[in-house]
Image (cartoon, grey):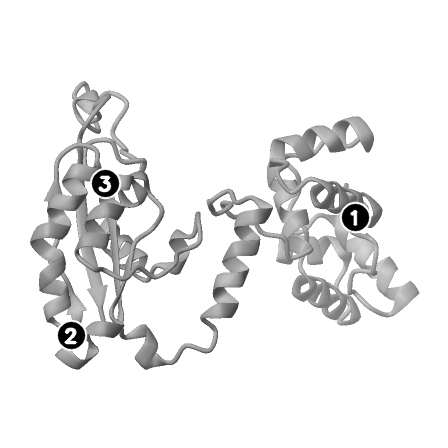
Amino acid sequence: MGRKPVNIDKKKNIIALHDAGKSQHEISRQLHISRQCIRQTIRKFDQLHTVATKPGSERPPKVTDRQKRAIKLEQLRDDTLSLADLVRYAYINLNLTITRQTVSRILHEFNMVSYTAPRKPRTTPIQRRNRLRWCHEHLSWSVNDWSNVIFSDETNFEILHRKNRIYIRRFRTDSTRFERYQKRVHKGGGIGLWSYLTCHGLGPLVIYDGRLNSVKYIDILEHHLSAALQKFPSQQSQKILYQQDNARPHVSAQTQEYLKEQRVKLIPWPANSPDLNIIENIWSILDQK
């Protein structure tokens, strides 16, 4: 265990007692400091007229500024590199042995933080062009225009096979710690919901079993779409537009024939654009709950 450094207040006391005529042996017994430290403090004060530590007299940093910039540039070249990868890079390329904590502090000095990359739908150039065209076509729509749209969608909530983790902390000697587990199944364990959203409020949550197909989807529309249409004033009935995405049960010939028979007007919807449907926010709130 190394010797503790003497703070500046004790050094000032050493100089004060020395000026008062005390010997180094007496100062050492009074302040409980070694005579070597007292001798060095007095000699330093006689030379520099101060007891403060000289700039640059501390232990030099192990990582230079140039090496820090090299680590930062390596992270910028590939933003998916982990701290362990950067430790390996510093050892191989910079001949530097450092820990992951040191790398993390270096990156924080450059205001670089880590986060989980968000998941987004994969889109083709044609799909991106169609989405942009759709946005330009509806850019001039007013609130009244959007109030004529019935936004609908279905979702599936996992109950027994959720992706979130449950962290448990128990004593190592606790023999019952493995009795606490998270249930999972290979198939099933979820619940399918369909609903709609209008300017007049939310529709009911319709539960269906299994995967949604054209027959189930048409049955849902048969029992619940008329209730959504009845919420609009009669003079607005000719302007109502029904929104649905391009899922297979929605665009099948059987479903399209049914919507045509019921004279339901569809709003054109670009492919691979779930983020444009405002009911997605409702599904997110329900999933968090």
Q: Amino acid at mark 1?
A: Arg
Which of the two residues, 146 or 79, is positioned nearer the viewer here?
Answer: 146
Please name the residue that numbered disc 3 is placed on.
254
Kindly check if marks 1 and 3 are in contact, taking CB atoms under 8 A apart as contact: no
Calculate the distance from the C-alpha at mark 1 to the C-alpha at mark 2: 63 Å
Which image quadrant is residue 157 in? Answer: top left
First of labels 3, 2 by sequence position: 2
Q: Secondary structure at mark 1?
A: helix
User: Residue, x 60% and y 35% (percent of image)?
Assistant: 82
Q: Secondary structure at mark 2?
A: loop
First of labels 1, 2 by sequence position: 1
Neighbourhood count class around disc 2 (C-alpha, 10 Å): few under 14, some 14–19, many 20 upward: some
> Is residue 282 shown above or below 67?
below
Calculate the distance from the C-alpha at mark 3 to the C-alpha at mark 2: 27 Å
> Is residue 147 shown above or below 274?
below
Viewport quadrant of the N terminus: top right
Residue sitting at the far top: 175
> Is residue 98 shown above or below 219?
above
The image's mark for residue 69 is 1
Residue 75: x %, y % from top left: 70, 42
Q: Can residue 1 be seen in this snapshot? A: no
Neighbourhood count class around disc 3 (C-alpha, 10 Å): few under 14, some 14–19, many 20 upward: few
User: Residue, x 75% and y 28% (percent of image)?
Assistant: 91
Residue 9: x %, y % from top left: 66, 66
Q: Amino acid at mark 3?
A: Gln
Neighbourhood count class around disc 1 (C-alpha, 10 Å): few under 14, some 14–19, many 20 upward: some
Please name the residue that numbered disc 2 is placed on.
232
Kindly check if marks 1 and 2 are in contact, taking CB atoms under 8 A apart as contact: no
Discs 3/2, front: 3
Discs 1/3, front: 3
Residue 240: x %, y % from top left: 24, 69
